[in-house]
Image: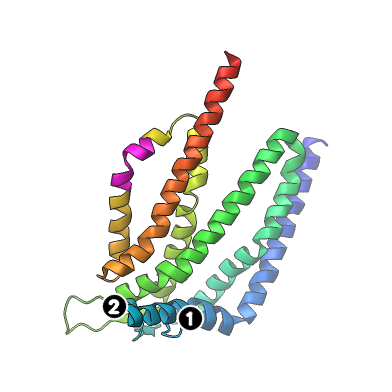
């Protein structure tokens, strides 16, 4: 194919991707009650699965700190057209998420012929694992971190004379930030893999500073959870596990690099 033919093919890839996103966004716009009531606003409800299970666990072990989001803060819209604009924005984001598999397939179908068989295999594996880790991070953020964050940030007060009336746009923005941040944090094993592959990061370094990493993780957990030790542990354990899994990945990559180096010698 000539250069212009490649550009024409890329143009149709982009057009098909945009059409898929618009169709998915339209579907999300039509299902506004499900998107907002069952997904976006659900974590602040006492009957949300995480809130309910944690409260039941707290009652069993005698820890009131686990009963979170029992008195949801009031959400307000303070700008004309704020709800409509947020409806459009959320629909576009939902459309992008729903259409992502198709969009990815389109670009992969366009790029893959230019890759060597070995490169194609590694690229496919990296994409699969990174997508899986991102999804796990999203679910972790939504079902674990988000309920704690909502409970803490909406109930925190510097004075009893100040009432929290949360701006709806601020609420949605914080949800997006927490969930996407978790998705990115869960990409740590992939980042460690590539940094270890080029020799920048070593398992020895990560083992040496694991105590520092543990302190940072517990500080983050303390900020986003109520002042309850059990709550902080529930949030910290998955992050610590992720760190140690990354150490194992770095060690495996290092052994592979050393083996190749010895074969060359």
The chief SS type of the magenta part is helix
Question: Does residue 46 appear left or right of residue 183 in this picture?
Answer: left
Is residue 207 rendered magenta in the image? Answer: yes
Residue placed most toward the observer, 257 or 164: 257
Q: Position of residue 119 (x, y in %)?
A: 69, 35
Q: Which residue is mark 2?
A: 63
- The quadrant in which residue 45 appears is bottom left
Can residue 78 be seen here? The reply is: no
Residue at screen point 57% across, 50% down: 130
Question: Does residue 18 appear left or right of residue 210 in this picture?
Answer: right
Residue range of the region highlighted in magenta in the rendering: 205-213
Residues packed near mark 2 inside 10 Å, few (<14), some (14 to 19) or many (20 plus): some
Question: Is residue 175 depicted above or below 186 in this figure?
Answer: below
Q: How is the image coloured?
A: rainbow
Question: Is residue 162 depicted above or below 187 in this figure?
Answer: below
Q: Secondary structure at mark 1?
A: helix
Residue placed most toward the observer, 82 or 136: 136
Q: Quadrant of the C terminus?
A: top right
Determine the residue located farthest toward the front in the rendered image.
Answer: 60
Residue placed most toward the observer, 88 or 153: 153
The span from disc 2 to disc 1 (Cα, nearest Å) is: 38 Å
Nearest to N terminus: mark 2 or mark 1: 2
**Number of the label disc, if any, that sits on residue 167:** none
Question: Is residue 114 depicted above or below 101 in this figure?
Answer: above
**Number of the label disc, if any, that sits on residue 83:** 1
Residue at screen point 71% across, 59% down: 102
Q: Position of residue 166 (x, y in %)?
A: 34, 79
């Amino acid at each position: 194919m000539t250069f212009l033919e490649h550009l024409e093919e890329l143009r149709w890839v982009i057009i098909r991707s945009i059409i898929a996103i618009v169709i998915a966004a339209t579907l999300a716009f039509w299902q506004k009650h499900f998107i907002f009531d069952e997904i976006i606003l659900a974590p602040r409800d006492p009957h949300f699965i995480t809130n309910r299970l944690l409260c039941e666990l707290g009652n069993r072990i005698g820890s009131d700190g686990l009963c979170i989001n029992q008195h949801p803060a009031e959400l307000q819209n303070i700008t004309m057209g704020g709800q409509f604009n947020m409806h459009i924005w959320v629909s576009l984001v939902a459309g992008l998420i729903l259409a992502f598999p198709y969009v990815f397939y389109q670009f992969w179908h366009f790029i893959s012929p230019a890759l060597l068989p070995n490169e194609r295999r590694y690229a496919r594996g990296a994409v699969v694992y990174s997508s899986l880790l991102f999804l796990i991070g999203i679910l972790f953020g939504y079902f674990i971190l988000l309920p704690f964050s909502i409970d803490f940030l909406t109930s925190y007060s510097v004075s009893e004379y100040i009432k929290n009336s949360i701006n709806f746009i601020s609420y949605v923005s914080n949800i997006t930030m927490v969930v996407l941040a978790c998705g990115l944090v869960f990409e740590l094993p992939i980042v460690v893999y590539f940094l270890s592959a080029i020799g920048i990061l070593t398992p020895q370094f990560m083992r040496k500073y694991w105590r520092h990493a543990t302190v940072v993780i517990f500080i983050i957990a303390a900020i986003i959870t109520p002042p309850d030790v059990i709550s902080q542990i529930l949030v910290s354990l998955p992050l610590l596990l992720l760190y140690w899994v990354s150490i194992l990945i770095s060690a495996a990559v290092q052994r592979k690099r050393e083996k190749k180096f010895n074969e060359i010698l």
